[in-house]
Amino acid sequence: MLVPFIIASPLEQFEIVTIVPFSFLGWNFSLTNSSLFLLLSGSLLLISLSLSFYKNNIVPHRWQLTYEFLYEATSSMVQENLGRKGEHYFPFIFALHLLLLTCNLVGMVPYTFTVTSHIAFTFGLALSIFIGINIIGFQTHGTKFFSLFLPRGVPLIIVPLLVTIEFVSYLIKVFTLSIRLFANMTSGHTLLKIIAGFAWTMLSAGGLLAIFHIVPLFLLIALIGLEIGIAGLQAYVFTLLTCIYLNDVLEIH
């Protein structure tokens, strides 16, 4: 009797599962796998930071060198895009970079959950940053902030069209910031799941297929290395775009 293979959907890994249900006044405050791994990622980040600087050694160890490298990379990013005025915002940008990087890397561990693979998280984060950037713009420039949507020397006849285009392109920043991170993490993890399922199916089938399952297995290992690189790159790009959008409101034309 042949036992049929049960192939799980590659999208199952993105399902939100309630762990501890809790509601208050009609609002749902349940602890889900998404919120759990977000808390775990934040806790892991704080613990690793504390351990990396636990002892002030003359010769830094590997953990300390890693965080010093990330610090220098983020500092260079802020300096190149914001200049000296970016020093005031560096703590937030550095924390954002580390949190996204940790969430992306934690999601690479089997049987964990990738927080950044959900548009609800990435869009909420991007929207919060967008609102904060606009508040900074108003505090810095007042009503002159609206000149961001109208460059100087524009003929009056095309002002309505140009303001509409500038305003729409300005709002789209929220979507580009959130969708880029969400789409890259989701597509990468989905591809890994498909290749892993294909290799397991070939191995379970036995015979000649079991021998050649090593081909998708090697491909899976290569893709895991690529996905780890993408995890770091997407955290960097998200942080870089945040610096660029912040500079846009600080240096209006």
Image (spheres, grey):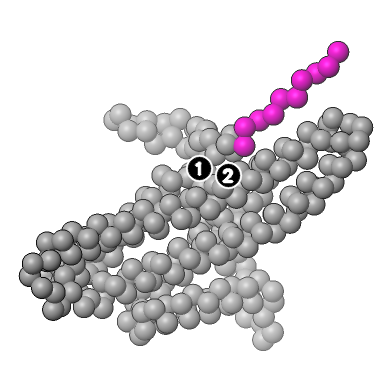
Please state which amino acid type lies under the numbered disc 2.
Answer: Phe
Q: Are marks 2 and 1 in contact (CB under 8 Å)?
A: yes
Of residues 2 and 104, the one drawn nearer to the viewer in this rendering: 2
Q: Is residue 124 left or right of residue 41?
A: left
Q: Relative to 117, is 5 above or below?
A: above
Q: Residues within 10 Å of mark 1 (few under 14, many from 20)?
A: many
Q: Is residue 194 left or right of residue 158?
A: right
Residue found 67% across the figure and 86% down from its top: 58
Residue 24 can be seen in this image: yes
Residue found 45% across the figure and 63% down from its top: 238
- Mark 2 or mark 1, which has the lower sequence index? 1
Q: Residue furthest top?
A: 1
What segment is highlighted magenta in the picture?
1-10
**Snapshot quadrant of residue 204:** top right
Residue 164 coordinates in the image, percent (x, y): 18, 59
Quadrant of the rendering where the N terminus is positioned = top right
Mark 2 → mark 1, Cα distance in angstroms: 7 Å
Residue 146 coordinates in the image, percent (x, y): 15, 68
Q: Relative to 82, is 223 above or below?
A: above
Q: Residues within 10 Å of mark 2 (few under 14, many from 20)?
A: many
Q: Which residue is mark 1?
A: 34
Of residues 169 and 125, the one drawn nearer to the viewer in this rendering: 169
State the SS at label 2.
loop
Residue 83 coordinates in the image, percent (x, y): 37, 84
Residue found 62% across the figure and 80% down from its top: 56
State the SS at label 1.
helix
Residue 28 forms part of the magenta stretch: no
Quadrant of the rendering where the C terminus is positioned = bottom left
Residue 220 coordinates in the image, percent (x, y): 74, 50
Please state which amino acid type lies under the numbered disc 1.
Answer: Ser
Residue 113 has which mark? 2
